[in-house]
Image: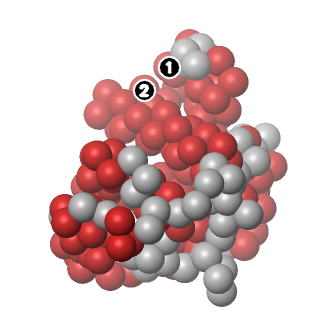
Amino acid sequence: MARIPYADPAAMDETTSRLMERLAPLNIFKMMANAPGLVRPFVDLGGAFLFDGKLAPVTRECAILRVGYLSNAGYETAQHEKIGRDLGMSDALIEAVKVGPADTSLSEEQRLTLAFVDDLVANVRAGDETFQPVLAHFGPEKTQELTLVTGYYMMVCRFLETFDVDIEDGGAGGLNLANADALSDQAG
């Protein structure tokens, strides 16, 4: 049960109310609306990763899920397991992400990604032993994106867990990335 009430739609200012009407009816957004000035920037940055990022979608979801598992963030992992499956991730791959970079069923890119995420989550600054292979594999732009995705979802997990955001009635499923164009229009 959430630690504070979700934002009351009747008490929202017009700008926040209009934004909330266009977003998927997710509890994370309903909780975030208690700080209305933060909803738009939060959604815009998350949307940039989901819709404009250069990382392969499955690689991105591996990183997001790993952050969620390391953070013990049930809401985050439920939502992104759903997103990952919508993108074609198998249950076996999701289980491998839970295990981490040592899982031998992961591709080389997935192992590099998870090792880098593990390092960032644990140490803030990635060490050369994870940074250099990721940089060599992805190049500067995607390495920066992976770093920012990891940091953003660390923030998301801490927000979700601090406020005990509940998984929606009926379970995860508020975002369907199979229709990404409509969703990016929805958030924008």
Q: Is residue 12 left or right of residue 72?
A: left
Q: Which residue does the image show at 72% across and 73% down from the upper left?
A: 91
For the point 31% across and 64% down, which residue is it? 12
Furthest toward the bottom, the residue is: 170
Q: Amino acid at mark 2?
A: Leu
- Which quadrant of the figure contains the N terminus? bottom right
The residue closer to the viewer here, 19 or 67, is: 19
Give coordinates of residue 154: x percent, y percent.
Answer: 56, 38
Against 34, residue 112 (above or below) is: above
Compared to 37, does 127 lie above or below? above
> Please, what secondary structure does the residue beneath circle 1 have?
helix
Describe the element under mark 2 as helix, strand or loop: helix
The residue nearer to you, when weighing 116 against 7, is 7
Percent position of residue 76, x then y = 61, 58
Residue assigned mark 2: 135
* Image location of residue 23, percent across then percent down: 33, 72
Decide: is 10 above or below 147.
Answer: below
Report the amino acid beneath label 1.
Gln
Name the residue that disc number 1 marks. Answer: 132
Height in image: 143 above or below 16? above
Label 1: few (<14), some or many (≥20) within 10 Å?
some
Q: Are marks 2 and 1 in contact (CB under 8 Å)?
A: yes
Q: Identify the residue shown where x is 63% and y is 49%.
A: 163
- The answer to whether residue 31 is seen in the rendering is yes
